Amino acid sequence: MMRLKLIALGAAAVLAAYTSEACAYIGPGAGFALLSSFLAVIVAFFTAFLALATFPIRKLVRLRRRLKRHAKARVDKVVILGLDGLDPEICETLMDSGDLPTFSELKASGTYRRLATSTPAMSPVAWSTFATGVDASRHGIFDFLARDPRTYLPVLSSSLITGGGRWLRLGPFRIPIRSGGVRLLRKSRSFWKVLSDYGVFCSVLRVPITFPPEKLNGVMLAGMCAPDLRGTMGSFTYYTSSDADKKTGGTVVKLRSSGGSRGERFDTALEGPKSPFAKGGSGGSDAGGDDTLKIPMTITVRKDRRGAEISVSGEKFFLREHEYSPWVRLTFKAATGVKLHGIAKFYITQLDGDFGLYVTPINIDPEKPAMPLSYPSFYSVYLSKLIGPYATLGLAEDTWAVEEGVLDEAAFLEQAYGFHEERRAMWFETLKKQRKGLVACVFDLSDRLQHLFFRYLVDDHSANVGKDTLQHRDALYDMYREMDRLVADTLRHIDDRTALIIISDHGFKPFRKGINLNTWLQDDGYLHFKEGVEPGEYLEGVDWTKTTAYAVGLGGIYINRKGRERSGIVESSDFDALKQAIKDGLLAIDDGGVQAVNRIFDVEKDFSGPYRNEGPDLIVGFKEGYRVSWDCAKGIVTKDIIEDNEKSWSGDHCMDPASVPGILFSNMNIIEESPGLVDIGPSVLDLFGVPVPRYMVGKSLMGQP
């Protein structure tokens, strides 16, 4: 058996070098799928043989492309610094006031432009457009969420979970005998894949919509939409001795005292992912009766030392009130010999009175990843050895914990800047070590802080009611100054044979009011509920035999089309007229004399790509200050169509794309006066002397060499 394992490992090494990897995957909410069949070993041998046999031919093709590219390359290296959500208006204001000296110098010596974002103006759409040089109708990502036409339920737009399908049942165990996986749903090809074809080495760090990571000539670390160990987009745990309510975005655990001579003691447990094996019992794992893997945890409160002693997963540490722990390694036992590894940070929110302990979402341990966080798979391990443990969750900054009152703004800022420092470390290590090729990284701090702190820039924002408006008034401006320092430090790694491109995917505006599109659709007779049924989340209770249109996500409206949706009723002959009627009605929404909707995109008519029929039929471009309401995003129909946004999440960009452009700085001469995100990929290819593929709709922004 050991000999068979060694042979399989040898085949896997060849696969890692020349072909796609065979991996064990976990997906959001799907649990783990383990490769265990003998068939996988045979396939590995066969694929490895083909890879070796065709290696000389592939090597010659790559050499020819590389020589052709080198003859036309303008630069040796392209560095792309992505600053998610950095807003041009704020940048220009702070440059004029002298607060952003590095940006100002780069504008004077190079190029600065406002950068047109994607339609719609959402991060997964925008970064997919950046990666591929095409619009949403050609890469297929129209929103954070899509909808399943068979169930009408929302699904993650960026990745698809494929189940293992076959299990061997042995008593309480379920042993997978066919591997499952997770698949990237973004269509088209990224420009780094094109560069790879021409022998350009690419380092792509934390760019959104790169989970699972793509195979390329280089390295990749997944960004936004990489899940936590539980398979969610980020679910915190809050332990409290009080009678706390259920929290959106996390789990609340009620603590009960176990006494204790040195201080009040709480014996509890930390919940991890679902067990892939157990069914209705522990079965030799850490799973409880609900198949959730758990680790025993003991908390001993030491008020005399203003903190608590915590013991969990073999780790014992003392944690002071209002201080974050380092990353704590957590090991969940799924079965004998099968362990799932995660990391988390701990933070005591309250010591006096009721005790409160916050635990971050359990990130996948980059040193022992339970699913592919990077390509090649050992790259995440390498980074962890180099810079220490780091956040791997795509949306690591826990905005929900702030919204739910678990973390205050000071604690959130400390967390967000901590993750930012991790990103800086991996960024500068990569810049220092890579002399040629592409180096790209996206920093998220700018996006997360503007979402939560934009209210400080708007005195009359409804989100300010009942909240402090002074303590963190400079938080956003301080963040912009930090971005300026980041650019200054980056410039130290830029020589005259390196092109620097700094971009943001969109800008930001205040999110003052929410519009419930489903409420409007109901009021105007397009959406109907079953009689006697109480409407619930995600359009529960809708009568699909009468409904002609419904909204899903952050601005998409779908027609309940016959032959497409499971219970579709709208005939093709009525399709265009229905869309026009909805457009006319939405454009007429009046909020005290203000038109709340700027424009509406008819996807079939305004887009021309092959995947335009897979997205919503209409995309609503809201006026500045308006966005889909929180309840509408959850598929809840409310009484009022328009409501004030009173949440801390007070800034947004899911509006008319024309009102939220991003930024573009470069040390290169950019000739285009109105560049767009769609042009970045073609421009990078041009700089390396690589032909721009015909499928790309963007163009190079660079002048003649």
Image (cartoon, helix red, strand yellow):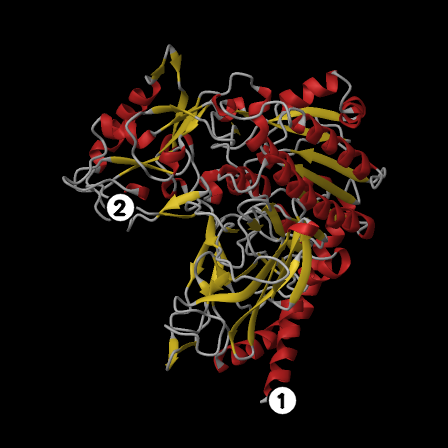
Residue at left offset 17%, top offset 40%? 530
Residue at left offset 63%, top offset 23%? 470
Q: Position of residue 252 (x, y in %)?
A: 46, 51
The answer to whether any part of residue 218 appears in the image is: no
Residue at left offset 55%, top offset 40%? 696
Amino acid carrying mark 1 in the image: Arg
- Asked if residue 403 is positioned above or below residue 241 in the image, the reply reads above
Quadrant in which the C terminus is drawn: top right
Q: Position of residue 512 (x, y in %)?
A: 47, 22
Q: Which residue is mark 2?
A: 565
Label 1 to label 2, Cα distance in Å? Answer: 52 Å
Near mark 2 (Cα within 10 A), the count class, few <14, some 14-19 or many ≥20, is: some
Local SS, label 2:
loop
Q: Which residue is mark 1?
A: 3
- Asked if residue 270 is positioned above or below residue 141 in the image, the reply reads below
Q: Position of residue 259 (x, y in %)?
A: 54, 61
Say whether disc 1 or disc 2 marks the residue closer to the N-terminus: 1
Amino acid carrying mark 2 in the image: Glu
Residue at left offset 77%, top offset 44%? 77
Q: Which quadrant of the figure has residue 247?
A: top left
The answer to whether the residues at label 1 and label 2 have Cβ atoms under 8 Å apart is no
Near mark 1 (Cα within 10 A), the count class, few <14, some 14-19 or many ≥20, is: few
Quadrant in which the N terminus is drawn: bottom right
Q: Is residue 563 left or right of residue 676?
A: left
Q: Which quadrant of the figure has residue 509?
A: top right
Local SS, label 1:
helix
